[in-house]
Amino acid sequence: MRRLSEDVSARTSRRSGGRAGRRRERMAAPLVMLPTLERGIPVLDLLGADAEELIHEESMRILEEVGIDFRDDEAAAMWREAGADTHGHRVRIDRTLLMDLVAKAPSEYTMHARNPERTVRVGGRNSIFVPMYGAPYVRDLDGNRRYGTLEDLYAFHKLAYLSPALHSTSALICEPVDLPVPRRHLHILYGLFRWSDKPFMGIVTAKERAEDTIAMAKIVFGEDFVNDNPVMTSVVNANSPLVWDATMLDALKVYAAHNQPCLLTPFALCGASTSASTVGAVAQVNAEALAGIAFTQLIRPGCPMVYGQFMVTVDMKTGAPMGGTPEAAQMTLLMGQLARRYGLPFRTSGSHVGAKLPDIQAGYEANMLMHAAILSGANYIWHAAGWLEAGLTASYAKFVLDAEQCAAWYRYAQGVKTDDLKDAMDAVRQVGPASHFLGTQHTLDRFETAFFRPDLMEFGSWEQWQAEGSPDTETRAVQQARAMLDSYEEPGLDEGVHEALLAFIARREEELPADVS
């Protein structure tokens, strides 16, 4: 059997020209995108009903007794008018008021892409994978760690577009530090519209930038469409413990008013900005997220929002955030369980790691967190590609490695089908004892689709690997990223829309300062 396998492998290698040949064939093939993942496997409830109820009860008591700061005069006034107990920016929310508001947010929504074939569904049994966001540094194609540029950002936008299992282009995968901060968002958004036709994320760092995001989206989709239909999903972070600040609330008000969903996500360093307790951290973050979602329903009842969490533990020796820990996985599962209780779409993160390189530590951490994300029933799995160094670095190599793993997780989460069992049993009867299935018609009909076939993992013989130059995983991934970028073709943008975007950017750059004052 060993020699037979080697003969088959050798014939395949000669036919395709080895890994390089297979890459050429793949790049020449039509671009195929995976639709929204409809999960076919069960979710995992980590706690029983009594323990779940206890966490919910403690979250309610936090909001009723301790309260939460909405550090924005307009937001505090809106809570006061709604009947909450407010003292300055401190808001105490009765659980009945809170849950009545949360119940107005829908359990699912459609996020429209400018190419309708890329439109996705978020919520229920639907899941999407979204690349990372916010890294000031990149690990580039030459293995250097340096500040990101606009060229890097646009390259990541192209890689996201070309990756079948990534359902969104994200937005700020890396910071283009070669652009002035006040004008940077305009070019980030331009790249999202030009280099990809997938859904995207909005800008939240100032009210005016959120308004520019809406304005540019209206150029692309039409004003009436954007006013009523989600075309993006943005992130709005609470500052744990128990603060929604003015900057985030300003952006949130813009997006909610236009019916554009946001990921209401407390940013929690557990043990530092929460108590040093898994269930204690969950109770606090749950309170923060629910308060944010409830507030959006004061702005526009029925606007879709996503119950989110970003929870990592802190190394108590150094204070550094840690990524793929068992507690982080457990907290993901617990938050997913609570999201189902409230009937809300759930956002978590996938491959966010503390590793500095796309090495074995990165693989271990990513697997711990992505498996929890899948079993939690997460609907919006963010930071699913590219993340290194606790989010400080976006790696080209890890981006394509993670994107391939997203395709593997997609296959895993679809579940097992039994519709081919009869044909498989017919093949068993045909082959009988002490033979092999490699030449049967059943195998020939299915050899390309029966099992997941990763391109970036090495499963060939030692001799084949040596003949290809003994590349490690990062080397293969860099080669893949280069090939993808070399093969990239623009998805096409209406010329009138393109010109209108450029005119808007030019006008806004005249109005905006070149430097932060």
Image (cartoon, rainbow, N blue to C red):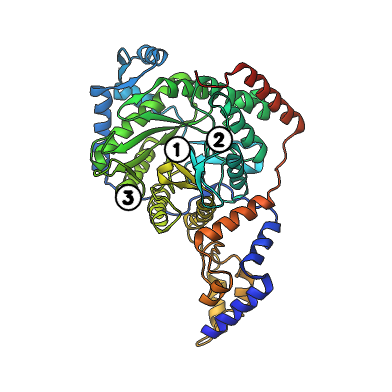
Q: Is residue 489 above or below residue 71?
A: below
Q: Quadrant of residue 193?
A: top right
Q: Which mark is residue 176?
A: 2
Other-residue count near label 2 (Cα within 10 Å), few / some / many at <14 / 14–19 / ≥20? many
Q: Residue at x 49, y 22 (%)?
A: 206
Q: Give the mark nearest the N terminus, 3 or 2.
A: 2
Task: Return the x and y of residue 252 as percentages of the image width and height.
Answer: 47, 24
- Say what secondary structure mark 1 lies in: loop
In the rendered structure, which amino acid carries the disc numbered 3?
Thr
Q: CA distance from mark 3 to mark 2?
A: 30 Å
Res 177 seen here: yes
Instruction: Kindly identify the amino acid type of the residue bearing the numbered disc 2.
Output: Pro
How many discs mark residues in the rendered view?
Answer: 3
Placement of 125 over or under 93, stated as above or below: below
Q: Upstream in the sequence, badge 3 or badge 1?
A: 3
Give the left or right position of residue 89, taking residue 228 as reference: left
| Gap between marks 2 and 1 measured at Cα | 31 Å
10 Å crowding of disc 1: few (<14), some (14-19), many (20+):
many
Determine the residue positioned at 72% across, 40% down: 492
Q: Are marks 3 and 2 in contact (CB under 8 Å)?
A: no
Where residue 150 appears, as percent x and y from the top left, is 59, 37
Q: Amino acid at mark 1?
A: Pro
Label 2: which secondary element: loop
Q: Position of residue 384 (x, y in %)?
A: 48, 47
- Describe the element under mark 3 as helix, strand or loop: loop
Q: Which mark is residue 345?
A: 1
Question: Quick one: 40 or 143, which is closer to the camera?
Answer: 143
Labelled disc at residue 325: 3
> Could you tell me residue 398's position as x and y percent?
50, 52
